[in-house]
């Protein structure tokens, strides 16, 4: 039974990470429009500088809510 719970948790984590990646990608594309000539990968890496997708999302979301 523990294996089943682990797989479900792993699946949920993978789904959340995919959703966060899409969020970060969209943000990078929006920023790229204001930075002609800067490669999208560079912009994305600067946004996701923390290395942790969840932390990046929480930081971006908090700054968006603070506006």
Image (cartoon, rainbow, N blue to C red):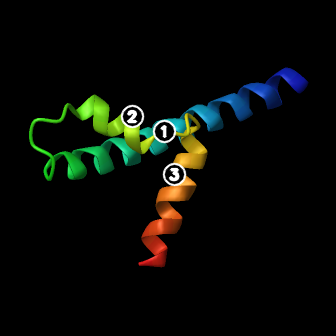
Residue density around tag 2, few if under 14, some if 14–19, many if 20 or more, within 10 Å = few
Q: Quadrant of residue 6?
A: top right
Q: Secondary structure at mark 3?
A: helix
Q: Residue at x 48, y 77 (%)?
A: 66
Q: Residue at x 22, y 52 (%)?
A: 30
Q: Is residue 49 visible?
A: yes
In this rendering, would 52 be left or right of 4? left
In this rendering, would 60 be left or right of 41? right
Q: Position of residue 36 (x, y in %)?
A: 9, 42
- Label 2: which residue? 45
Q: Residue at x 19, y 45 (%)?
A: 32
Residue 59 numbered tag = none
Q: Quadrant of residue 28?
A: top left
- Label 3: which residue? 57
Residue sitting nearer the eye, 53 or 39: 39
- Label 1: which residue? 49
Q: Position of residue 25 (x, y in %)?
A: 33, 41
Q: Position of residue 27 (x, y in %)?
A: 31, 50
Q: Position of residue 37 (x, y in %)?
A: 10, 35
| CB-based contact (under 8 Å), mark 1 and mark 2 | yes
| CB-based contact (under 8 Å), mark 1 and mark 3 | no
Residue sitting nearer the eye, 47 or 23: 47
Residue density around tag 1, few if under 14, some if 14–19, many if 20 or more, within 10 Å = few
Marks 3 and 2, how far apart in space? 13 Å
Q: Secondary structure at mark 1?
A: loop
Q: Secondary structure at mark 2?
A: helix
Residue density around tag 3, few if under 14, some if 14–19, many if 20 or more, within 10 Å = some
Q: Residue at x 59, y 37 (%)?
A: 52
* Quadrant of the snapshot with the N terminus: top right
Select label 3 or label 2 by which is in front: 2
């Amino acid at each position: 039974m523990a294996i089943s719970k682990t797989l479900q948790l792993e699946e949920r984590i993978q789904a959340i990470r995919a959703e966060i990646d899409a969020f970060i990608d969209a943000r990078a594309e929006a920023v790229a429009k204001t930075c002609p000539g800067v490669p999208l990968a560079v912009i994305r890496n600067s946004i996701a500088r923390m290395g942790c997708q969840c932390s990046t999302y929480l930081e971006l979301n908090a700054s968006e809510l603070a506006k």
